[in-house]
Amino acid sequence: MEYRTLPHGGEKISVIGLGMGSIHESAEKEIVRTLDAAIDAGINYLDFVPSKAVAFGPYAKALKNKRDKVMLQVHIGADYSQGEYGWTTDADKSIAEFESRLRLLGTDYADFAFVHCIDENADFDKVMNGKAWEYALRRREDGTVRHLGFSTHNVNIARRFLETGVMDMGMFSLNPMYDFTDESEYGKGSADDRGALYREFVAAGVGISVMKPFAGGQLLDSEASPFKRALTLNQCIQYALDKPGVLTVLPGVRGGRDLDDLLAFFDSTPKERSYAVLGEFAPPEASGACVYCNHCQPCPEGILIGQVNKYYDLTHMGDAMAKEHYLNLERHASECIQCGHCNDRCPFGVDQARRMGQIAEYFGM
Protein backbone atom coordinates (compact mmCIF):
# COMPACT_ATOMS: atom_id res chain seq x y z
CA MET A 1 0.00 0.00 0.00
CA GLU A 2 1.06 3.57 -0.67
CA TYR A 3 0.17 6.48 1.59
CA ARG A 4 -0.07 10.25 1.32
CA THR A 5 0.00 12.79 4.15
CA LEU A 6 -2.97 14.89 5.20
CA PRO A 7 -1.71 18.51 5.21
CA HIS A 8 -3.68 19.49 8.32
CA GLY A 9 -2.95 16.76 10.83
CA GLY A 10 -0.25 14.64 9.26
CA GLU A 11 -2.19 11.36 9.13
CA LYS A 12 -1.03 8.87 6.51
CA ILE A 13 -3.90 8.02 4.18
CA SER A 14 -3.94 5.07 1.79
CA VAL A 15 -4.00 6.19 -1.84
CA ILE A 16 -6.85 3.77 -2.46
CA GLY A 17 -9.72 3.85 -0.03
CA LEU A 18 -13.22 2.44 -0.30
CA GLY A 19 -16.53 3.93 -1.31
CA MET A 20 -19.39 1.88 0.07
CA GLY A 21 -22.36 2.84 -2.09
CA SER A 22 -22.83 -0.68 -3.50
CA ILE A 23 -21.58 -2.84 -0.66
CA HIS A 24 -25.19 -3.73 0.28
CA GLU A 25 -25.30 -5.95 -2.83
CA SER A 26 -23.30 -8.54 -0.88
CA ALA A 27 -24.47 -10.73 1.99
CA GLU A 28 -23.33 -9.90 5.51
CA LYS A 29 -20.47 -12.42 5.55
CA GLU A 30 -19.11 -11.07 2.28
CA ILE A 31 -19.27 -7.47 3.51
CA VAL A 32 -17.35 -8.37 6.64
CA ARG A 33 -14.83 -10.44 4.68
CA THR A 34 -14.30 -7.63 2.15
CA LEU A 35 -13.69 -4.99 4.80
CA ASP A 36 -11.39 -7.31 6.75
CA ALA A 37 -9.37 -8.00 3.60
CA ALA A 38 -9.20 -4.32 2.70
CA ILE A 39 -7.91 -3.31 6.13
CA ASP A 40 -5.43 -6.19 6.17
CA ALA A 41 -4.15 -4.96 2.78
CA GLY A 42 -3.43 -1.54 4.28
CA ILE A 43 -6.52 0.38 3.16
CA ASN A 44 -7.24 2.76 6.01
CA TYR A 45 -9.66 5.32 4.56
CA LEU A 46 -13.36 4.47 4.25
CA ASP A 47 -16.30 6.53 3.12
CA PHE A 48 -19.52 5.74 4.93
CA VAL A 49 -22.42 6.44 2.57
CA PRO A 50 -23.90 3.04 1.65
CA SER A 51 -27.02 3.05 -0.51
CA LYS A 52 -28.99 1.02 2.01
CA ALA A 53 -28.99 1.02 5.80
CA VAL A 54 -28.81 -2.78 5.80
CA ALA A 55 -25.04 -2.41 5.39
CA PHE A 56 -24.62 -0.77 8.80
CA GLY A 57 -24.64 -4.00 10.83
CA PRO A 58 -21.96 -5.92 8.94
CA TYR A 59 -19.95 -2.72 8.56
CA ALA A 60 -19.90 -2.31 12.35
CA LYS A 61 -19.02 -5.99 12.83
CA ALA A 62 -15.99 -5.65 10.56
CA LEU A 63 -14.79 -2.55 12.39
CA LYS A 64 -15.37 -3.86 15.90
CA ASN A 65 -11.74 -4.75 16.62
CA LYS A 66 -10.16 -2.61 13.92
CA ARG A 67 -11.56 0.86 14.51
CA ASP A 68 -8.13 2.26 15.31
CA LYS A 69 -6.77 1.04 11.98
CA VAL A 70 -9.12 3.09 9.79
CA MET A 71 -10.30 6.64 9.19
CA LEU A 72 -13.98 7.15 8.49
CA GLN A 73 -15.73 9.82 6.43
CA VAL A 74 -19.13 10.26 8.09
CA HIS A 75 -21.46 12.73 6.38
CA ILE A 76 -23.66 15.37 7.97
CA GLY A 77 -26.65 15.51 5.65
CA ALA A 78 -26.87 11.86 4.62
CA ASP A 79 -30.29 10.57 5.68
CA TYR A 80 -31.15 6.91 6.35
CA SER A 81 -34.37 7.44 8.25
CA GLN A 82 -36.29 5.52 5.57
CA GLY A 83 -33.81 2.63 5.38
CA GLU A 84 -32.14 3.82 2.18
CA TYR A 85 -29.76 6.61 1.35
CA GLY A 86 -31.30 10.05 1.21
CA TRP A 87 -30.03 13.59 1.34
CA THR A 88 -31.20 16.45 3.54
CA THR A 89 -30.32 20.02 4.46
CA ASP A 90 -32.58 19.92 7.53
CA ALA A 91 -30.27 20.60 10.46
CA ASP A 92 -32.07 18.59 13.13
CA LYS A 93 -32.39 15.54 10.88
CA SER A 94 -28.77 15.85 9.74
CA ILE A 95 -27.50 15.94 13.31
CA ALA A 96 -29.70 13.07 14.48
CA GLU A 97 -28.67 10.90 11.54
CA PHE A 98 -24.97 11.66 12.06
CA GLU A 99 -25.14 10.66 15.72
CA SER A 100 -27.15 7.56 14.84
CA ARG A 101 -24.47 6.36 12.45
CA LEU A 102 -21.77 6.80 15.06
CA ARG A 103 -23.81 4.63 17.44
CA LEU A 104 -24.44 2.03 14.77
CA LEU A 105 -20.71 1.83 14.10
CA GLY A 106 -19.97 1.46 17.80
CA THR A 107 -17.65 4.45 17.80
CA ASP A 108 -17.64 7.74 19.69
CA TYR A 109 -15.88 9.79 17.03
CA ALA A 110 -15.64 10.45 13.30
CA ASP A 111 -12.22 10.98 11.79
CA PHE A 112 -13.82 13.23 9.16
CA ALA A 113 -17.25 14.86 9.41
CA PHE A 114 -18.28 15.92 5.92
CA VAL A 115 -20.89 18.51 5.03
CA HIS A 116 -22.72 16.27 2.60
CA CYS A 117 -23.29 16.78 -1.12
CA ILE A 118 -23.71 20.53 -1.48
CA ASP A 119 -24.00 21.50 -5.15
CA GLU A 120 -26.15 24.65 -5.02
CA ASN A 121 -25.42 28.06 -3.53
CA ALA A 122 -28.76 28.15 -1.72
CA ASP A 123 -27.98 24.84 0.00
CA PHE A 124 -24.49 26.05 0.92
CA ASP A 125 -25.92 29.22 2.48
CA LYS A 126 -28.56 27.28 4.41
CA VAL A 127 -26.24 24.64 5.82
CA MET A 128 -23.17 26.76 6.46
CA ASN A 129 -25.17 29.47 8.25
CA GLY A 130 -27.24 27.11 10.35
CA LYS A 131 -27.32 24.64 13.23
CA ALA A 132 -25.71 21.76 11.33
CA TRP A 133 -22.47 23.65 10.74
CA GLU A 134 -22.47 25.04 14.27
CA TYR A 135 -22.86 21.47 15.48
CA ALA A 136 -19.91 20.30 13.36
CA LEU A 137 -17.70 23.03 14.81
CA ARG A 138 -18.70 22.13 18.38
CA ARG A 139 -18.04 18.44 17.79
CA ARG A 140 -14.59 19.26 16.44
CA GLU A 141 -13.86 21.24 19.59
CA ASP A 142 -14.91 18.38 21.89
CA GLY A 143 -13.10 15.68 19.86
CA THR A 144 -16.16 13.88 18.50
CA VAL A 145 -14.94 15.03 15.10
CA ARG A 146 -11.23 14.97 14.30
CA HIS A 147 -11.36 16.79 10.94
CA LEU A 148 -13.90 18.79 8.96
CA GLY A 149 -14.60 18.27 5.29
CA PHE A 150 -17.17 18.56 2.54
CA SER A 151 -18.43 16.81 -0.57
CA THR A 152 -19.51 18.49 -3.79
CA HIS A 153 -19.54 18.02 -7.56
CA ASN A 154 -19.46 21.75 -8.22
CA VAL A 155 -16.22 23.70 -8.79
CA ASN A 156 -17.58 26.98 -7.46
CA ILE A 157 -19.10 25.38 -4.37
CA ALA A 158 -15.76 23.69 -3.66
CA ARG A 159 -14.14 27.12 -3.76
CA ARG A 160 -16.67 28.46 -1.26
CA PHE A 161 -15.81 25.63 1.11
CA LEU A 162 -12.07 26.28 0.68
CA GLU A 163 -12.64 29.95 1.50
CA THR A 164 -13.92 29.03 4.98
CA GLY A 165 -10.32 28.25 5.93
CA VAL A 166 -11.32 25.43 8.28
CA MET A 167 -11.59 22.44 5.97
CA ASP A 168 -9.12 19.56 6.01
CA MET A 169 -10.52 17.37 3.22
CA GLY A 170 -12.88 17.73 0.31
CA MET A 171 -14.62 14.89 -1.52
CA PHE A 172 -14.83 15.80 -5.21
CA SER A 173 -15.90 13.96 -8.36
CA LEU A 174 -12.79 13.59 -10.49
CA ASN A 175 -12.15 11.59 -13.65
CA PRO A 176 -11.28 12.24 -17.33
CA MET A 177 -14.93 12.36 -18.39
CA TYR A 178 -15.79 15.11 -15.92
CA ASP A 179 -12.59 17.02 -16.61
CA PHE A 180 -12.75 16.94 -20.40
CA THR A 181 -16.43 16.79 -21.37
CA ASP A 182 -19.82 18.26 -20.56
CA GLU A 183 -21.46 14.83 -20.62
CA SER A 184 -22.47 14.77 -16.95
CA GLU A 185 -24.06 17.01 -14.34
CA TYR A 186 -21.23 15.86 -12.04
CA GLY A 187 -18.53 17.34 -14.27
CA LYS A 188 -19.37 21.00 -13.92
CA GLY A 189 -16.58 23.37 -14.95
CA SER A 190 -14.11 23.62 -17.81
CA ALA A 191 -10.94 21.55 -17.96
CA ASP A 192 -8.82 24.60 -17.16
CA ASP A 193 -11.05 25.69 -14.29
CA ARG A 194 -11.17 22.23 -12.76
CA GLY A 195 -7.39 21.95 -13.08
CA ALA A 196 -7.02 25.29 -11.31
CA LEU A 197 -9.32 24.08 -8.53
CA TYR A 198 -7.10 21.09 -7.80
CA ARG A 199 -4.16 23.46 -7.34
CA GLU A 200 -6.29 25.65 -5.08
CA PHE A 201 -6.88 22.64 -2.82
CA VAL A 202 -3.11 22.32 -2.44
CA ALA A 203 -2.64 26.04 -1.77
CA ALA A 204 -5.31 25.83 0.94
CA GLY A 205 -3.72 22.74 2.52
CA VAL A 206 -6.88 20.72 1.91
CA GLY A 207 -6.71 17.15 0.64
CA ILE A 208 -8.99 15.63 -1.98
CA SER A 209 -10.73 12.29 -1.59
CA VAL A 210 -11.93 11.30 -5.04
CA MET A 211 -15.43 10.04 -5.69
CA LYS A 212 -16.70 8.64 -8.99
CA PRO A 213 -13.22 7.85 -10.39
CA PHE A 214 -14.81 5.65 -13.08
CA ALA A 215 -17.78 8.00 -13.72
CA GLY A 216 -20.16 5.40 -12.37
CA GLY A 217 -18.60 2.76 -14.62
CA GLN A 218 -19.12 4.71 -17.84
CA LEU A 219 -15.40 5.08 -18.47
CA LEU A 220 -14.93 1.32 -18.22
CA ASP A 221 -17.45 0.67 -21.03
CA SER A 222 -16.62 1.66 -24.60
CA GLU A 223 -20.32 1.99 -25.45
CA ALA A 224 -21.13 4.23 -22.48
CA SER A 225 -17.93 6.30 -22.48
CA PRO A 226 -18.07 9.67 -24.25
CA PHE A 227 -14.63 8.82 -25.65
CA LYS A 228 -16.03 5.63 -27.26
CA ARG A 229 -13.08 3.74 -25.87
CA ALA A 230 -12.95 1.92 -22.57
CA LEU A 231 -10.36 2.91 -20.00
CA THR A 232 -9.17 0.53 -17.31
CA LEU A 233 -9.40 0.70 -13.54
CA ASN A 234 -5.66 1.29 -13.41
CA GLN A 235 -5.77 4.17 -15.89
CA CYS A 236 -8.58 5.92 -14.05
CA ILE A 237 -6.96 5.49 -10.63
CA GLN A 238 -3.61 6.77 -11.87
CA TYR A 239 -5.30 9.71 -13.60
CA ALA A 240 -6.88 10.78 -10.31
CA LEU A 241 -3.72 10.24 -8.26
CA ASP A 242 -1.74 12.45 -10.63
CA LYS A 243 -3.94 15.46 -9.90
CA PRO A 244 -2.68 18.05 -7.38
CA GLY A 245 -4.19 17.71 -3.95
CA VAL A 246 -5.44 14.15 -4.33
CA LEU A 247 -4.70 11.98 -1.31
CA THR A 248 -6.96 9.02 -1.92
CA VAL A 249 -9.28 7.53 -4.54
CA LEU A 250 -12.48 5.93 -3.27
CA PRO A 251 -13.94 3.48 -5.79
CA GLY A 252 -17.14 1.72 -4.82
CA VAL A 253 -16.94 -2.01 -4.13
CA ARG A 254 -19.62 -4.70 -4.09
CA GLY A 255 -17.48 -7.40 -2.53
CA GLY A 256 -14.17 -9.22 -2.52
CA ARG A 257 -13.84 -9.52 -6.29
CA ASP A 258 -14.06 -5.76 -6.74
CA LEU A 259 -11.52 -5.29 -3.94
CA ASP A 260 -9.08 -7.68 -5.62
CA ASP A 261 -9.41 -5.71 -8.85
CA LEU A 262 -8.53 -2.50 -7.04
CA LEU A 263 -5.57 -3.96 -5.18
CA ALA A 264 -4.16 -5.23 -8.49
CA PHE A 265 -3.32 -1.58 -9.19
CA PHE A 266 -0.23 -1.94 -7.01
CA ASP A 267 1.09 -4.79 -9.14
CA SER A 268 0.39 -3.02 -12.44
CA THR A 269 3.14 -1.66 -14.68
CA PRO A 270 3.60 1.99 -15.67
CA LYS A 271 2.40 1.00 -19.13
CA GLU A 272 -0.80 -0.48 -17.70
CA ARG A 273 -1.42 2.71 -15.71
CA SER A 274 -0.68 5.04 -18.62
CA TYR A 275 -3.60 7.15 -19.79
CA ALA A 276 -1.72 8.76 -22.68
CA VAL A 277 -4.63 7.85 -24.94
CA LEU A 278 -6.57 10.73 -23.38
CA GLY A 279 -4.44 13.13 -25.39
CA GLU A 280 -6.51 12.09 -28.40
CA PHE A 281 -9.74 13.11 -26.67
CA ALA A 282 -8.73 16.24 -24.76
CA PRO A 283 -10.68 19.34 -25.81
CA PRO A 284 -8.81 22.17 -27.57
CA GLU A 285 -8.58 24.27 -24.42
CA ALA A 286 -6.79 21.40 -22.62
CA SER A 287 -4.20 21.00 -25.38
CA GLY A 288 -0.84 22.43 -24.48
CA ALA A 289 -1.45 22.26 -20.73
CA CYS A 290 0.66 19.97 -18.58
CA VAL A 291 -1.48 17.54 -16.58
CA TYR A 292 1.55 16.15 -14.66
CA CYS A 293 1.03 12.68 -16.11
CA ASN A 294 4.78 11.98 -16.56
CA HIS A 295 4.32 10.31 -19.92
CA CYS A 296 7.23 12.46 -21.10
CA GLN A 297 9.58 10.45 -18.87
CA PRO A 298 12.32 9.44 -18.74
CA CYS A 299 14.15 12.72 -19.20
CA PRO A 300 17.75 12.17 -20.38
CA GLU A 301 18.90 14.71 -17.78
CA GLY A 302 16.86 13.20 -14.96
CA ILE A 303 14.46 16.13 -14.61
CA LEU A 304 11.13 15.14 -13.05
CA ILE A 305 9.17 17.13 -15.60
CA GLY A 306 5.71 16.54 -14.16
CA GLN A 307 6.80 17.63 -10.68
CA VAL A 308 8.66 20.65 -12.02
CA ASN A 309 5.48 21.76 -13.80
CA LYS A 310 3.32 21.09 -10.76
CA TYR A 311 5.52 23.04 -8.37
CA TYR A 312 5.73 25.91 -10.85
CA ASP A 313 1.94 26.07 -11.21
CA LEU A 314 1.41 25.82 -7.46
CA THR A 315 3.94 28.58 -6.80
CA HIS A 316 1.93 30.80 -9.12
CA MET A 317 -1.09 30.02 -6.92
CA GLY A 318 0.80 31.47 -3.96
CA ASP A 319 1.92 28.18 -2.39
CA ALA A 320 5.23 29.03 -0.73
CA MET A 321 5.89 25.39 0.11
CA ALA A 322 5.73 24.50 -3.59
CA LYS A 323 8.68 26.77 -4.26
CA GLU A 324 10.65 25.04 -1.51
CA HIS A 325 9.75 21.65 -2.98
CA TYR A 326 11.00 22.80 -6.36
CA LEU A 327 14.27 24.12 -4.96
CA ASN A 328 14.83 20.82 -3.17
CA LEU A 329 14.56 18.76 -6.36
CA GLU A 330 17.81 17.13 -7.43
CA ARG A 331 17.43 18.38 -11.01
CA HIS A 332 15.89 21.67 -12.10
CA ALA A 333 14.40 23.17 -15.25
CA SER A 334 17.62 25.09 -15.86
CA GLU A 335 19.35 21.76 -16.58
CA CYS A 336 17.11 21.08 -19.60
CA ILE A 337 19.26 20.58 -22.74
CA GLN A 338 16.35 21.23 -25.13
CA CYS A 339 16.63 17.80 -26.71
CA GLY A 340 12.90 17.64 -27.42
CA HIS A 341 12.48 14.11 -26.06
CA CYS A 342 9.64 15.24 -23.77
CA ASN A 343 7.87 17.13 -26.54
CA ASP A 344 7.76 14.04 -28.72
CA ARG A 345 6.23 11.94 -25.93
CA CYS A 346 3.67 14.40 -24.50
CA PRO A 347 0.13 13.20 -25.34
CA PHE A 348 -1.29 16.66 -24.61
CA GLY A 349 0.90 18.59 -27.00
CA VAL A 350 2.83 20.55 -24.39
CA ASP A 351 6.03 22.25 -25.56
CA GLN A 352 7.89 21.14 -22.45
CA ALA A 353 11.27 22.30 -23.75
CA ARG A 354 10.00 25.87 -24.02
CA ARG A 355 8.23 25.57 -20.68
CA MET A 356 11.45 24.43 -18.97
CA GLY A 357 13.01 27.68 -20.14
CA GLN A 358 10.15 29.69 -18.68
CA ILE A 359 10.32 27.85 -15.38
CA ALA A 360 14.10 28.22 -15.14
CA GLU A 361 13.78 31.96 -15.74
CA TYR A 362 11.02 32.26 -13.15
CA PHE A 363 12.95 30.51 -10.36
CA GLY A 364 16.23 32.17 -11.34
CA MET A 365 18.31 29.02 -11.22
Image: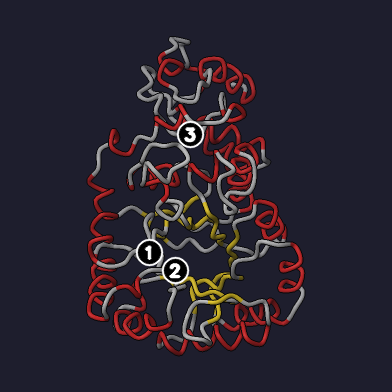
Tell me what residue is drawn at x 52 percent, y 38 percent: 325
Q: CA distance from mark 2 to mark 1?
A: 6 Å
Residue type at mark 3: give it. Tyr
The amino acid pointed to by label 2 is Asp
The kind of secondary structure element at disc 1 is: loop
Closer mark to the observer between disc 1 and disc 3:
1
What amino acid is found at the position of numbered circle 1 in the picture? Leu
- Which residue matches tag 3? 292
Whether residues under marks 2 and 1 lie with C-beta atoms below 8 angstroms apart, the answer is yes
Q: How many marks?
A: 3
Dot 3 or dot 2, earlier in sequence? 2
| Real-space Cα separation, disc 1 to disc 3, in angstroms | 25 Å
Q: Earlier in the sequence, mark 1 or mark 3?
A: 1
Instruction: Bin the neighbour count of mark 1 within 10 Å (Cα to Cα): few under 14, some 14-19, many 20 and up.
Output: many
Q: Nearer the viewer, residue 212 or 361?
A: 212
Quadrant of the frame with the C terminus: top right
Q: CA distance from mark 3 to mark 2?
A: 27 Å
Question: How many C-alpha atoms fall within 10 Å of the one at disc 3: few (<14), some, or many (≥20)?
Answer: some
User: Where is residue 193 drawn, in percent x and y?
Assistant: 65, 41
Q: Which residue is mark 2?
A: 47
